[in-house]
Image (spheres, rainbow, N blue to C red):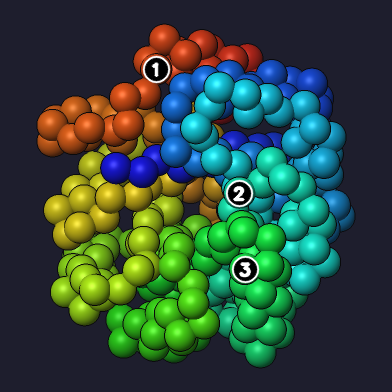
Amino acid sequence: MKIIESVRDAMQGVQEFIPTKQKIEYINLLLKVGFNVIDFSSFVSKRHIPQLADAVDVLAGLDKTDTSTKLLALVGSKKGGEIASQFEKIDYIAYPFSVSETFQKFNLNSDFTKSIETIEFIQNQCVKIEKEIVLYIAMAFGNPYGDKWNIDLVFEWIDKFRKMGIKQITFSDPAAVADAEKIALLFSRFRDEYADSEIELGAHIHSEPDNWYEKVDAAYKNGCRQFDTVINGFGGCPMSQKKLISNLKTGDLLNYLDAQNCNYNNLDLEAYQLALEKANEIFPRQK
């Protein structure tokens, strides 16, 4: 089981600037918990996501001593990829692709052609410097913007990315249109058709408090063993032009995995509790 704790997604929509020192303290607490990966920040336009304009300063303050947790940074352009590739502490460079060209325009002011060029650039950079690209496929579970969407289309994109040598892909649902049936269909098809591939497939789920379980259950029971989470479910995608829907709560996933008797990397639960308390200090409006 692989858990990616997304500080970036929790913070990016918060209007009041969170002091850099607080961000560093919080992420350093998370580094002691034992998550597989922490999505710590992004290198994108400061105008669009001002909350994360201090990514370089935050990274400088992070202590990776005595932790196996890897750091992930999200980028939205070749320039962002170049910046992220300069830092030894960063293990993964993520790029948010979307099967909806409309959402790609909203999110990154990009189209399919430009996005593929950016992905190829980041992939080539990562190969040179021994980092790995993580490709998020937004609108994988449906498209509320009116663009063409079907499951075959999603897998056409996966085939293209596999041929490019990409091995880390996460289905993402920033507009929270996924339901258990679509989740099951996508993950079961991947399991059946890509069993021999080197691709690791994850889930980045947004949900209301009353339907997270069915979504996680559908993914898990159809082979998903990688989930993005956020302590207390803070956050949502501010670029979707839709209502912000909470992320999957870390505690909800851990409770689900306990019920399935699934080992989740022996997380330090005392360290997790300290991080939870710190999160409640940083995000008081979202308790």
Q: Is residue 167 visible?
A: yes
Q: Which sits earlier in the primary sequence, circle 2 or circle 3?
A: 2
Q: Which residue is mark 3?
A: 127
x then y, percent, for residue 265: 32, 31
Query: On the rendered structure, is 284 left or right of 264?
Result: right
Q: Which residue is mark 2?
A: 91
Alpha-carbon span between mark 2 and mark 3: 12 Å
Res 63 → quadrant? top right
Q: Single out the mark in the foreground, 2 or 1.
A: 2
Q: Circle 2: is it few (<14), some (14-19), or many (20+) Cα within 10 Å?
A: many
On screen, residue 204 above or below 95: above
Give the residue at x 24% y 73%: 196
Q: Single out the mark in the foreground, 3 or 1.
A: 3
In front here: 39 or 239? 39
On screen, residue 69 above or below 100: above
Give the residue at x 52% y 82%: 164
Give the residue at x 31% y 25%: 266
Q: Circle 1: is it few (<14), some (14-19), or many (20+) Cα within 10 Å?
A: few
Task: Identify the amino acid type marked 2.
Answer: Asp
Give the SS element for disc 3. Answer: helix
x then y, percent, for residue 109: 74, 74
Q: Are marks 2 and 3 in contact (CB under 8 Å)?
A: no
Q: Is residue 215 visible?
A: no
Q: Single out the mark in the foreground, 2 or 3.
A: 3
